[in-house]
Amino acid sequence: MILWLKPFLPFLLLLIKPLSSKPLTFIPRWVPELLLVALLLCQESILHAFDWIQNWSISITQIPYSVPAMPFSNWLFGEDGAADSASKMSILDLPELPLELILGKFSPAELCRMACVSRGLRDRCRSDHLWVRHMSDKWGKVLGEAAIREWELRVASRICFSVDGDGEGVELKGWRMKLSSVWPLSWLKNRMEGGRKPKSPLPADSLISFYQALESGRFSFPAQIFNRENGHTGFLLSCYDAEISYNSSTNKFYARYPPHGKRSSIIEEVPWDRVRATSVTTSAHEFHISDCLSDLRPGDHIEIQWRKNKGFPYGWWYGVVGHSETCDKSERHCCCHRHETIAVEFNHYVPGSRWRTATINWKEHREEGNENDGFYGGIRKLQNKEEISRWIQLWPSRVLE
Ligand SMILES: *[C@@H]1O[C@H](CO)[C@@H](O)[C@H](O)[C@H]1NC(C)=O
Ligand SMILES: *[C@@H]1O[C@H](CO)[C@@H](O)[C@H](O)[C@H]1NC(C)=O
């Protein structure tokens, strides 16, 4: 009915206007004008309501969260080759800036769903610049340089990787190579045997591909775990290297620690707040060469490598630089920086405990210690307030013997 009336509304208005131009003595002049304004307003609101109903019917059909069926998505998103797309509006017809702003608001899951809708949207939703923020928001704090290097190596090896060495065409092999970076081989094999080519391989070196590998737990990477083994007292206020992978259903990580002497490697489930990116590029079996030793002053927060014996990996232990025994510990007369040694204090141990202090020679810095007290290695000075506060938050509720 509204549809039918819509084209005639302006004519109706025209019909009214000439009538009103003949002055009728018993009707004031302003009445027809008011009528005209009222009619115009009426027309506007009817047209607006019509628009609104149309928009509403679109949004209603969109409510199911799964990807809509093809004919509808053709219509809505202008899939290439849709028969009568010329007269339809698609999201891709939006100007560049608003479209980017809208896609920028989408969560990773929404972007992935949008990418399934049409070819045009697929390329847009997968583009790296949309994923930079998601990568750093979710994984920034746990991905260190070592993890990124490992991913790059994996991508490089995948690109040179062939599923089986038979004499198939180069083109098909290239296609398989790209695909093998995205789906597990068993899945790939099923698809090949079914004779159907998957439509849209993710580019192996894209950020979305990196994000999905992390999210699915398929990519395990080096990181460090605070208070390993569920807060075992022997590891309080330490941070150890581990290989971790994410489990999205528990929102936790599996951490696999390298073998500790004769003990085989241990796997533990850890929450986000006990994970950090690897802090240095030195491996857990190497002595870390420190570049901060001559700058260390009493009160500085540090991490120091320590291991129980030479076959074990190092962990990083939190401590503060203290005054030497001969120093009178006042700020003005402190002469600690003139000594060749630094006193490192571990204040979560009771005074008198053999773990409470360690003396490090900074002029000839090398691994120091013995089989009884373990071996101290390199030192990192903590400059970053956030890093220090993370250690303070982990402070044990009681002092250790
Ligand atoms: C309906 O959607 C079109 C774009 O698709 C928009 O320009 C218009 O403002 C919308 N109308 C209402 C009433 O929301
Ligand atoms: C993730 O955790 C759930 C719940 O404990 C478990 O059922 C699932 O197997 C785990 N996933 C992986 C990949 O280990």
Image (cartoon, rainbow, N blue to C red):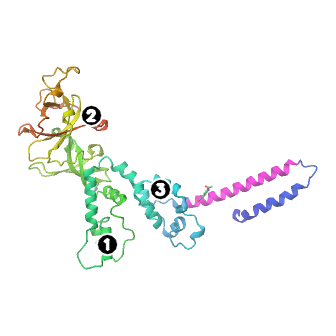
Residue beneath disc 1: 174
Q: Mark 1 or 2 closer to N-term?
A: 1
Q: Mark 1 or 3 closer to N-term?
A: 3
Q: How many marks?
A: 3
Q: Is mark 1 within 8 Å of ligand 2?
A: no
x, y percent for residue 174: 31, 72
Q: Which mark is residue 220?
A: none
Residue in the image at 73% along x and 63% along y = 5
Q: Mark 2 or 3 closer to N-term?
A: 3
Neighbourhood count class around disc 1 (C-alpha, 10 Å): few under 14, some 14–19, many 20 upward: some
Image height of 123 relative to 394, above or below: below
Position of residue 121 in the picture relative to residue 247 (left or right): right
Secondary element at tag 3: helix
Residue in the image at 76% along x and 61% along y = 9
Q: Specify the segment rendered in magenta.
A: 29-58
Within the image, what quadrant is residue 341 found in? Answer: top left
Q: Does residue 356 appear in the picture of this structure? A: no
Frontmost residue, 139 versus 15: 139
In reply to whether residue 355 is colored magenta, the answer given is no
Quote the CA–CA distance across marks 1 and 2.
51 Å
Position of residue 101 in the picture relative to residue 394 (left or right): right
Residue beneath disc 2: 392
Tell me the kind of residue under disc 3: Leu
Residue beneath disc 3: 103
